[in-house]
Image (cartoon, grey):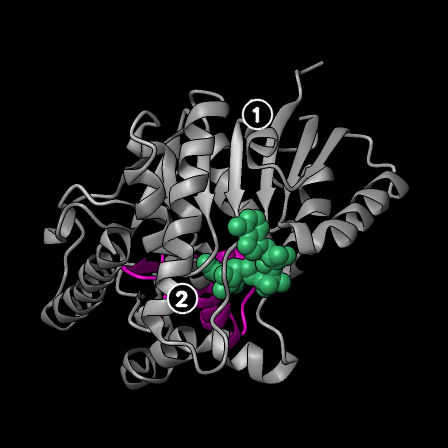
Amino acid sequence: AKDPVRVLVTGAAGQIGYALVPMIARGIMLGPDQPVILHMLDIPPATESLNGVKMELTDAAFPLLKGVVATTDVAEACKDVNIAVMVGGFPRKEGMERKDVMSKNVSIYKAQASALEQHAAKDVKVLVVANPANTNALILKEFAPSIPEKNITCLTRLDHNRALGQVAERLNVPVSTVKNVIIWGNHSSSQYPDVNHAVIDSPDGEKAVRDAVSDDAWLDGEFIKVVQQRGAAIIKARKLSSALSAASSACDHIRDWVLGTPKGSWVSMGVYSDGSYNVPPGIIYSYPVTCANGDWTIVQGLSIDEKSRAKLDATADELVEEKALAYTCISE
Ligand code: NAI
């Protein structure tokens, strides 16, 4: 039998946490033959509800779940973890300035970076979900210099999956037949959902999504807007932000990173930019990636037309600006 993998979920008493921990305990993140030990972190006001989640994990009698650590102590939470899913953060409240939210999250991610660096497994893989996801991940990377930068990522897989979902709905085909959409840039409304390289599997082979949809006005207009604004649409409908889809996409992100992407397909991940596609280095930017042997690689050589170029640049500009804002918060 395999040794258990230790998976940290921060913000585990929150909405996404509640959807995510049972998925991990059922093997959806790491596979049906991989035992897990869950580490759940939240803050002191959430202690009781965190313990409630722990009770429910016991009650669900998950065969793969070999242990649960539920704590408000960051060092204890990070101890020896192999995977860290960072969902905890400070939400934007009514009347709060962007800078105030940034400042709160910068201090959280700075502190948790140090804790991971000191206590986690040396090869810990980190996925930041909490917003501003790209910039939180960047801060985590900057303040955990001994964790390889390749091991620090943020979640844009939800946006990727949303794009697949929209194309599948439009074409009335199973979502599993659609692949190779791309989310470029920030997990925010400046992101660019790109279908120029996307394909569907059809009975007569692979077909470009552009040809299959055959409505450029929709693909270049409504489709992009719907994906960019989907988070807001869910909040409007549910009065709560996306949780089951965020949790499921976080599992997809880690599963593909650890177990590899299927041949001929890629996924979107927020990773530390090396300047690929003329994106500024030094920001966490969502790229198309393939994964093998526990590593991701940016897909190279895709053609970028002029319209796309402007969109890749606009979302990069926003990230450069967020980075500057984060650094003002650090120096204050
Ligand atoms: P939530 O408010 O229900 O849960 C957040 C939890 O984090 C709370 O239990 C809170 O006590 C905890 N927390 C706060 N500060 C913490 C700290 N310093 N350490 C540990 N835990 C802490 O929020 P929800 O709906 O679960 O969303 C979590 C985050 O994920 C938000 O920032 C949200 O914007 C983001 N999000 C990101 C998505 C993505 O695709 N990247 C999609 C959906 C949400």
Coordinates of residue 304 in the picture (x, y in percent): 14, 61
Residue identified by numbered label 1: 79
- 13 relative to 195, above or below: above
For marks 1 and 2, the one nearer the N-term is 1
Instruction: Tell me: 288 left or right of 320.
Output: right
- 122 relative to 116, above or below: above
Q: Which residue appears at 78% of the width and 52% of the height?
A: 48
- Can residue 201 be seen here? no
Q: In which quarter of the image is the C terminus?
A: bottom left
Residue toward you, 14 or 290: 14
Coordinates of residue 21 in the picture (x, y in percent): 69, 45
Coordinates of residue 219 in the picture (x, y in percent): 32, 78
Instruction: Tell me: 265 left or right of 77.
Output: left
Report how many numbered discs are placed on residues in the image: 2
Q: Which residue appears at 36% of the width and 60% of the height?
A: 103
> What mark, if any, has residue 101 been given in the picture?
2
Coordinates of residue 198 in the picture (x, y in percent): 34, 60
